[in-house]
Image (cartoon, rainbow, N blue to C red):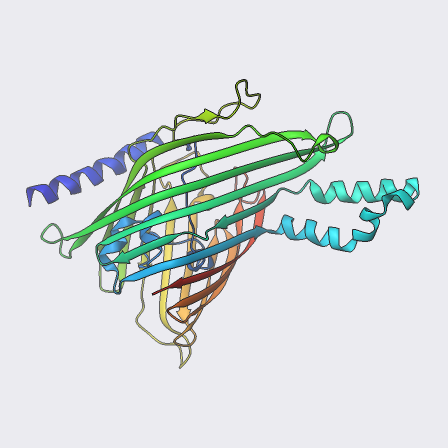
């Protein structure tokens, strides 16, 4: 009992520490978002989904009902700027491939329209073909990979188009463990810890588009870090669960190495600051006719004590229901923007789609990035 009380006291002290710190992360932590969560508006910290314990709340391992081994978990996320640029290329492919036969006026018009589309920040994120992960009650282990590509083209000082491209890759080996503690509160409290070893590589280059070549050399920064997360789940009632998670509580530092002797691009920040999220999940235990059942509602507040982040950027809210035993419908609000999703669960194969808006600016409503995502998961 004394050990359990010590753990509980540590969790409380971390809450207070996060409240006093109230600062933005220098480096973003790796989050491999599952599409079920994204379709629910991003709420996850108190929702018992088998994919959530690794990146959202390790205490959720205490509620895993059935062991599962995921062999393939491939996810693609594309924002609207990517689709707009792809559509522009398809609509103007003949002109782009035959610019020599265009009049100067047609060339200028094509260049102006292309530049207008290219200035939109495109983002492509790929998770997989790993993760490979295994979860059972109280325990989980997994290997995760992720690639994040962003690019945009803008007019440089000389009038020539300039390409800005950034690529980040992550590999994370994670393991988690959770226990259930009775006697502290009227209901058992679930406490979890996740340890993670992160390998990150990233590069960025800004250069005139006309001077890019196939042999272009990129300055790649690569480094490793070890950190751990803590989490808890408390069932306030049978229908209402409260969750809280603390990420990178040891504030890991990445020691960067670069592949060139005299890099031009500045070294990235070295520290991943600790952060936290809290949320609730509500299960009304009711059916709406013969179709909608297994209803669940969830609300997350990210960095609730950070005054530098505006309110709507912190809020993730959503709901999920079964339409049939294998088809799920989801909806919600991701940082104040609508989100929805659908999923098909054949147990061995799971297919999901999600659409949501993400705020890239400092304030809600400043710069939204609409994203479509699809995933294929194969496991036993």
Residue 273 appears in view? no
Left or right of 143 in this view: 180: left
**Residue at image location 58% in from the left, 30% down from the top:** 218
Q: Nearer the viewer, residue 59 or 240?
A: 59
**Percent coordinates x, y for residue 92 in the rendering:** 79, 52
Q: Nearer the viewer, residue 340 or 345?
A: 345
**Percent coordinates x, y for residue 333 in the rendering:** 48, 55
- The mark tally for this picture is 0
**Percent coordinates x, y for residue 188 in the rendering:** 15, 56
Quadrant assignment, res 35: bottom left
Left or right of 77 in this view: 305: left
Residue 375 appears in view? yes
Specify the farthest residue to the front.
215
Specify the farthest residue to the bottom.
290
Point out the image quarter for the C terminus. Answer: bottom left
Q: Nearer the viewer, residue 29 or 379?
A: 379
Specify the farthest residue to the top.
262
Left or right of 38 in this view: 159: right
**Residue at image location 25% in from the left, 64% down from the top:** 65
Quadrant assignment, res 21: top left
């Amino acid at each position: 009992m004394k050990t359990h009380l010590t753990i509980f006291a540590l969790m409380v002290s971390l809450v207070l520490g996060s409240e006093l710190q109230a600062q933005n992360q220098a480096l973003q932590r790796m989050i491999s978002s599952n599409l079920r969560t994204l379709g629910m508006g991003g709420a996850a910290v108190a929702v018992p989904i088998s994919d959530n314990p690794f990146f959202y709340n390790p205490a959720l391992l205490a509620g895993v009902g059935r062991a599962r081994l995921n062999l393939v978990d491939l996810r693609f996320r594309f924002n609207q700027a990517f689709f707009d640029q792809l559509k522009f290329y398809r609509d103007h492919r003949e002109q782009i491939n035959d610019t020599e036969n265009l009049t100067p006026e047609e060339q200028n018009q094509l260049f102006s329209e292309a530049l207008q589309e290219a200035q939109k920040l495109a983002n492509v994120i790929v998770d997989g073909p790993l993760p490979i992960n295994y979860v059972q009650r109280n325990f989980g282990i997994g290997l995760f990979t992720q690639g994040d590509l962003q690019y945009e083209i803008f007019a440089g000082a000389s009038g020539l188009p300039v390409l800005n491209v950034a690529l980040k890759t992550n590999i994370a080996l994670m393991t988690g463990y959770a226990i259930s503690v009775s006697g502290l509160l009227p209901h058992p409290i679930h406490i979890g810890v996740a340890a993670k070893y992160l390998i990150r590589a990233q590069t960025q280059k800004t250069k005139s588009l006309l001077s890019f070549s196939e042999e272009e050399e990129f300055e790649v920064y690569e480094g490793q870090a070890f950190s751990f997360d803590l989490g808890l789940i408390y069932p306030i009632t049978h229908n209402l669960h409260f969750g809280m998670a603390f990420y990178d509580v040891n504030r890991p530092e990445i020691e960067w190495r670069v592949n060139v002797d005299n890099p031009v691009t500045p070294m990235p920040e070295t520290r991943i600051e600790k952060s936290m999220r809290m949320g609730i999940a509500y299960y009304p235990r009711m059916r709406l006719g013969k179709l909608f059942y297994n209803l669940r509602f969830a609300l997350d507040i990210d960095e609730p004590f950070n005054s530098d982040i505006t309110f709507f950027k912190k809020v993730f809210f959503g709901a999920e229901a079964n339409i049939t035993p294998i088809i799920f419908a989801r909806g919600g609000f991701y940082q104040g923007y609508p989100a929805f999703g659908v999923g098909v669960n054949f147990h061995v194969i799971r297919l999901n789609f999600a659409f949501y808006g993400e705020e890239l600016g400092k304030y809600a409503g400043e710069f939204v990035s609409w994203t479509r995502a699809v995933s294929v998961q194969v496991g036993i």
